[in-house]
Image (tube, coloured by chain):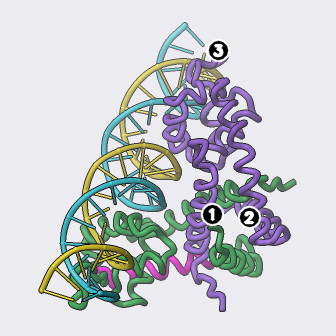
Chain colours: A green, B purple, C yellow, D cyan
Amino acid sequence: MLRTDRCSCHGLRKATRHLTQFYDQRLAPVGLNIGQYALLAHLAARGPIGIGAFAATMAMDRTTLGRNLQPLERDGLLAIGPDPADRRSRLLALTPEGEARLAAARPLWRAAQEDLDARFGPERTQALRVMLAELLATDLA
Amino acid sequence: MLRTDRCSCHGLRKATRHLTQFYDQRLAPVGLNIGQYALLAHLAARGPIGIGAFAATMAMDRTTLGRNLQPLERDGLLAIGPDPADRRSRLLALTPEGEARLAAARPLWRAAQEDLDARFGPERTQALRVMLAELLATDLA
DNA sequence: GGAAGATAAGTGTATATACGCATAATTCAA
DNA sequence: TTGAATTATGCGTATATACACTTATCTTCC
């Protein structure tokens, strides 16, 4: 018999640990975790972008994003350069190495998604994604 | 128009950051975050318990739990004592201070839950909890 | 043009997360 | 009974998360 948590936040956090470990293990062969993969994938799609705007895109605290960029920059997967239009801002962009790493990671990510679909069910997975997007869009302040 | 994430894990992690910040802010007046509140609440319910068993209960890595206990022990909210039946094991239990802190936190947690229900909808909140429990119960290894 | 306010980002600090390795105690089997 | 396998935990390391505070730059208004 399935026991749901009384606390919605605790249930969410537990499920996140569970799923994060799964994705992290699947991506480990290319030396990325799911958070880093998401950063690279979104950065590839949004082109050069400032830290604040990118943090908003990722629904992440600005300072958290700043810290998370450091290992990726250190490893040469992304470059942080000046913004010619605003000297306060610094523009993020993938390096060729970052694009190569992302390309290597994509099939692993896709396989993880498909495995999740197979084990949890495509409809439930889809329903979960919708519900999580709705929760994220809910103003809680 | 609502945009769902392609990556289930990324969607889950974003929603967790969002909801965790909400709960953390609501619990801040008593000096706890939602993770610490969950630890104290479950520890109160499960009585003295070893670290490994408690970690399994919390769906948390054993070493993560060990680290998370440190601030709570330092602040005198829980005690880590020897297990008379097995000298390898160490038993966790709330202190009176821990019980008092938990009692002070409960109304704030309850209010946060009710606010979430009001803003996200009780049916959706319940459906989300069920789906997350199902995901947690899904073997992904 | 210059002061006031707004905005972009970095730093210090604290907690959260988990892997790999090490240690100590228990259990089990020959 | 003792050596091997198992189990419970701790520690080193690396990354994730976010708050409060600070600095640098930009914008606006007079």
Q: Point out which mark residue B116 bears.
A: 2
The image quadrant where one finds the C terminus of chain A is bottom right
- Cα separation between marks 2 and 3: 43 Å
Q: Earlier in the sequence, mark 3 or mark 1?
A: 1
Q: Main secondary structure of the magenta part?
A: helix
Q: Are marks 3 and 1 on the same chain?
A: yes
In x, y percent, where is residue B23?
Answer: 63, 56
Nearer the observer, disc 1 or disc 2?
2
> Which of B43/A120 is in front?
B43
Q: Which residues are magenta?
A: A96-117
Q: Which residue is mark 3?
A: B84
Q: Earlier in the sequence, mark 1 or mark 2?
A: 1
Residue sitting at 64 percent across and 44 percent down?
B37
> Which of B119/D10 is in front?
B119
Q: Amino acid at mark 3?
A: Pro
Q: Is residue B77 magenta?
A: no
